[in-house]
Image (cartoon, grey):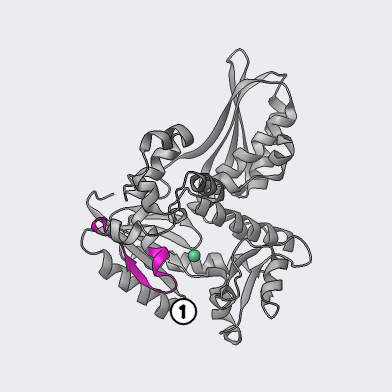
Amino acid sequence: MMKNCDILLCDLDAFFASVELLDDPSLQGKPVLVGGNPEGRGVVSTCSYEARKFGVRSAMPMKKALALCPEAIVLKGRMSRYKEMSHRVRQLFDRYTPDIEIVSIDEAYLAVKKGRGLDIAEAIHVDVRKELGLPISVGVSVNKLLAKIACDQAKPNNVGNLWPWEIEEKLWPLPARVLPGIGPVTGSKLQSLGINTVRDLALYSKGPLIRLFGSHGEAIYHFAHGIDNRTIETEHEAKSISEETTFPEDIQDREIIYGVLVELAAGVGYRLRSVGITARTITLKLRFKDFRTVTRSITMSECVCQDSDIYRAARDLFDRHCVKPPWRLVGIQASGFEQGTQISLFSSGPEREKENILTATKDNLRKKYGSEVIFPGRRLKKKK
Ligand SMILES: [Mg+2]
């Protein structure tokens, strides 16, 4: 990747709802919600800007959304169509740079030649609208953090920029939660320290933040000063993606291992989906009390990227090869990558489609707040 560059964050506006509006123009100007069943415990995956006027937000329970906006049109979503449009947007990005990091189905970072950022952002904004009929917002700056905030501030359907010399004037007055990594949990902890705005955080001492939040505290402190050293990670450079957990004590209970596997599978699945790839091989890593470590793999006939499929494969490997406790470490690795998404390979029944929508919603939340808001039910149960 080029060293000296401008960074763009391109984020499609209300993406699922926008695709529905595009395919059915009679929905234009109406509040549209894409997401789960209002009868059950469904949540809003995406809502049109029309619906947002009523206070509806993504990840809100569908029931509550309909209470706020009873005339909303609820659609269950068509993941394969969204993937197709996402792919076409991606192809359009390729015209401008090879340095692309796909964040999720509707969001990507692009690195372009220094000084060209704004022109390219304008061009992308126009092209996506004209050629694909979709609204997109683009933020331009020198790093991911500032590009992301510029984009959020520009939304909807606009191009924005935020440069390092504008931080005190433009970034500091904003609420601290605009910074990545400050979700509801960290946000309320900061509030109890009297930190409400980005300025409050920037002017707080770094030491106490590190003591309270660890390396996370240091990261958000730097973010408040506009500093972000994360690089653009172009896809498919990695040969495998893995996550593992070392236990502070020996684990005897296999239910605990299952719970951890759920979380590891969610982490691996999220990373696969965020770069738009699937894996054919799942490997389980297991370390015993005596530090003997075994790895066991399964190569499947279908490539996977869904949390539940990764979990099932890993759990299966565990059940067959766990021998006997205690265990010290467990890990999941995905490899044998293929381009594309699981949906195109499986015959997609309504259940699978529902899972895809739910996963996309979770991915959006994880992207927004980090993993702190995503607790698989299993872990919640174990914590009691
Ligand atoms: Mg979006």
| Residue 45 visible in this rendered orientation of the protein | yes
Q: Secondary structure at mark 1?
A: loop
Residue 354 pos. (x, y %) = 69, 61
Q: Quadrant of residue 43?
A: bottom right
Q: Categorize mark 1 by other alpha carbons within 10 Å: few (<14), some (14-19), many (20+).
A: some
Viewed as shown, does residue 181 lie left or right of 114? right
Identify the residue at the far top of this view: 290
Q: Is residue 226 above or below residue 248?
A: below
Amino acid type at circle 1 is Gly
From the top left corner, tell me how far across and down residue 246 is, in percent.
57, 25
The residue sitting at the front extreme is 194
x and y percentages locating residue 305 in the rendered image: 59, 49
Could you say which quadrant of the image residue 108 lies in? Answer: bottom left
Q: Is residue 277 visible?
A: no
Q: Which residue is mark 1?
A: 133
- In the rendered structure, the answer to whether residue 201 lies left or right of residue 337 reads left
Between 316 and 143, which is closer to the camera in this rendering?
A: 143
Residue placed most toward the observer, 52 or 122: 52
Does residue 248 lie above or below 108 as drawn?
above
Q: Is residue 8 magenta?
A: no
Look at the picture and state if 254 lies above or below 139. Answer: above
* Magenta residues (range): 151-165
Residue furthest toward the bottom?
26
| Residue 378 vs residue 343, the one in the foreground | 378
Quarter of the image holding residue 163? bottom left
